[in-house]
Image (spheres, rainbow, N blue to C red):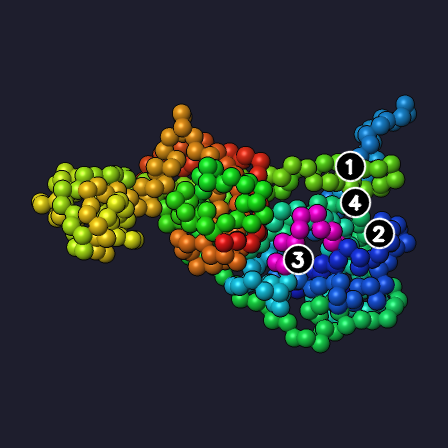
Amino acid sequence: MPTKLLRPNVGIYIASADAFANADITASSWKPTLAQITDIAKVFNVSPAITDAYTLNLTDSDTDNSLSVVDNAQVSTPTAYNYEVSLDGFRHSSIETATYYGKFRELVTAAVGTKYYIIKRTAKGHKEAFAVDDVVSVYGVTLDYPDDLVGDGEMIRVGGRFIPTGEVAVNTTVSTGTIGSGPWGTTTDTTARSTGTKIQSNGNVSVWWVKSSAVTDEAGFISGPSATIVNGTSGYSLTEAIAWDGYTLGASESNRIDDKSIIDKTNSKVRGFAQFSGSLTFFRPKFITGTYTVTTGVVSTSTITIATTDAAKIELGMSVTGTGVGTDAKVTGINTGTGVVTLSVVNSGAVTSAKFFNSYSTAFDLFKSATDARSTGWLVTRVGKTASTTLVSGEVVSVFKFTSDAVMDNTEGEDSMKFMVNFMPQGLIGVNQTVVA
């Protein structure tokens, strides 16, 4: 009885655009040489990073259904080849390039339009040295926008998205040549490579909203998002208010435009308009934002007095701002009988009015008016670092310009009340950009 080939006898490698320079990949006689496929500077083993749900195969060809006058049954003649490439990979706990996870992220988050060849080898372990007559398939691609993949209880992954160039060779064999020290990350690589450390989504995703009025240089904000703007008075941390349920925010596959020349034997595509989407579910606040008159607010004390009816409208932990209120003040005590509110810091001056709010009420204020006062601004996401309310120069974020649209209450079931907001793309996107001051 023949021997079945079992997992994990497959390897996936990413090769640079010049790995097979001037070669006609689609020619039936083409074979990669051993020297080409073992060039450590051009071919990289990313197999340990790739999740099992990858796509790297031919799909159904285009067909010509023309009939002759003598045909008496359906005829479908295959014409142009088609193939799909989509690789999701685990993300390392920090941004680096020494591990398999880090190398994969580095490659798929390069500039949009970067050309690669994706190589699949079967019947051998991914780290085994390449040899003459190894069976490989090679798929030409250019990079699309990557996608940060997160979810409740899930590991953070980066989705490599690719556009077929029409260059494909399936189940060809490696031809003779001088073996090199690659691919990177195989047994011929003299440097030991570690797999990497996975990082979970929970607690490692942050989201901000920046009002459009705060961004006067949109091109500059896309290429270098400003920490000063995001952390400023027109920037709002939404992270604490967002539920995982229904979380959608990020780039998706750009439009694919057929762009064959008369010599192309396979479907060559180019990238059309970028696509991105946003839909967030927020926890509904019990206490909304309120600004109340302060009857007693003495400098250098940590209490203020408001009307007892107003004291019933606030809760512990709410942030407090206003003239004379100390920096980063929060409510630590409430006496609803007297209206005395205790703060976490002393007053910096006399207080006559105070605004009370928290992350839930802030999100509600921003997006509650969907019919006559839609909000336009930027959603900023940071993935892979501990969630926080402050953005720091040098960090990596993605920015998307949206207008908020439909707001829908979610009151069903036994969980807490929420409201859902759909966001309409406004044509401006920056993925994996480094934050500037």
Q: Who is closer to the viewer here, 57 or 195?
A: 195
Label located before the other in sequence (2 or 3) = 2
Label located before the other in sequence (1 or 3) = 3
| Residue in the image at 87% along x and 51% along y | 24
Between disc 1 and disc 2, the foreground one is 1
Give how far apart the Cα atoms at labels 3 and 4 are.
20 Å
* Image marks 1 and 4: residues in contact by CB distance under 8 Å: no
At mark 2, the secondary structure is loop
Between disc 3 and disc 4, the foreground one is 3
Q: Check disc 2 and report the residue beneath it.
A: 25
Magenta stretch bounds = 105-117
Count residues near mark 2 (Cα–Cα under 10 Å), then give few for <14, some for 14-19, many for 20+. many
Label located before the other in sequence (2 or 4) = 2
The reply to whether the magenta stretch includes residue 49 is no
Label located before the other in sequence (1 or 4) = 4
Give how far apart the Cα atoms at labels 1 and 3 are.
25 Å
Residue 283: percent from left, percent from top:
34, 43
Give how far apart the Cα atoms at labels 2 and 4 are.
9 Å
Q: Check disc 1 and report the residue beneath it.
A: 259
Q: Amino acid at mark 4?
A: Gly
Which disc is residue 166 wearing? 4
Residue 271: percent from left, percent from top:
70, 40
* Image marks 2 and 4: residues in contact by CB distance under 8 Å: no
Q: Amino acid at mark 3?
A: Leu
Residue 48, compared with residue 271, is above or below; it is below
